[in-house]
Amino acid sequence: MQDDDKLKDKGSGLSRRSFLKVSGISLSVPLVMGYRVVKVRGADVKVFGPGKVPIQLTINGKAQTVEVEPRVTLLDALRNDLDITGAKRVCDRATCGACTMIVDGKPVYSCTTLAIEAQGKSITTVEGLMQGDKLHPVQQAFIDNDAQQCGFCTPGFVVACKAFLDKNPNPTPEQIQRGLGGNLCRCGTYMGVRAAVAQAAKGGRRNG
Ligand code: FES
Ligand code: FES
């Protein structure tokens, strides 16, 4: 058996065992349903992983089950495991907005949201905006105002615009500019995007 002293952190002088004692964490090991239970200050806390665990996500109104490691982001779970590829990975660090999804009514960067944390929440992607074969008014407004060039940022922008208009149905030009500050377009289509939001706000949002 490994000597506990060998595990000592030379800097702190604390062994792993004494750290757990001091911090009030004790291990109760059995692996049940993909998670372990540890005691933290007397309370049971579930610890998932590091292997794959089954999770259930509600995406565009449909419940879907997928097995992923707990470290997997919402973006990767959808793109790699569920083949829902509208949201794009560009910066992968919560800067550009290409991966924007709406989670419980709020726009989020799905590249920095864990899939496991999105359980029990309502997730909307660009695929969920169309109603049958009819474009969402924001999507239509992007076309009408030529609000895309290469189009790579467009799904994230469309979703961010929908979330913005849901909260701000009658925005001023200044509010539109500020409200879309979380999304970047390398092609520079900002004027078209702002015009699209203004059009959708004015009248074209009958679908939703
Ligand atoms: S890919 Fe998520 S913010 Fe850029
Ligand atoms: S249209 Fe090309 S990055 Fe936005």
Image (spheres, rainbow, N blue to C red):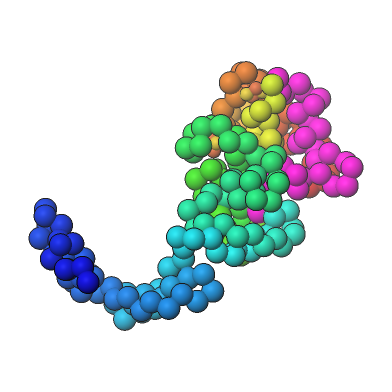
Which of the image's four quarters has the N terminus?
Answer: bottom left
Q: Splitting the image into four quadrants, where does ligand 1 fall?
A: top right
| 59 over 83 or under it: above or below | below
Where residue 81 appears, as percent x and y from the top left, is 65, 50
Q: Residue at x 41, y 75 (%)?
A: 37
Residue 196: in magenta span: no
**x and y percentages locating residue 146 in the rendered image:** 76, 21
- Indicate yes or no whether the magenta region holds residue 142: yes
Q: Nearer the viewer, residue 30 or 60?
A: 30
**Camera-side residue of 130 and 201:** 130
Q: Residue furthest front?
A: 1
Q: Nearer the viewer, residue 65 or 130?
A: 65
Q: Nearer the viewer, residue 40 or 30?
A: 30
Q: Is residue 49 left or right of residue 148?
A: left
Quadrant location of residue 172?
top right
Q: Residue at x 70, y 20 (%)?
A: 149
**Residue name at image x 46 percent, y 63 percent:** 49
Q: Position of residue 185 (x, y in %)?
A: 60, 24
Residue 10: which quarter of the image? Answer: bottom left
Q: Is 107 located above or below residue 33 in the figure?
A: above
* Residue 202, visible in the rendered structure: no
Please give the range of residues in magenta.
123-149
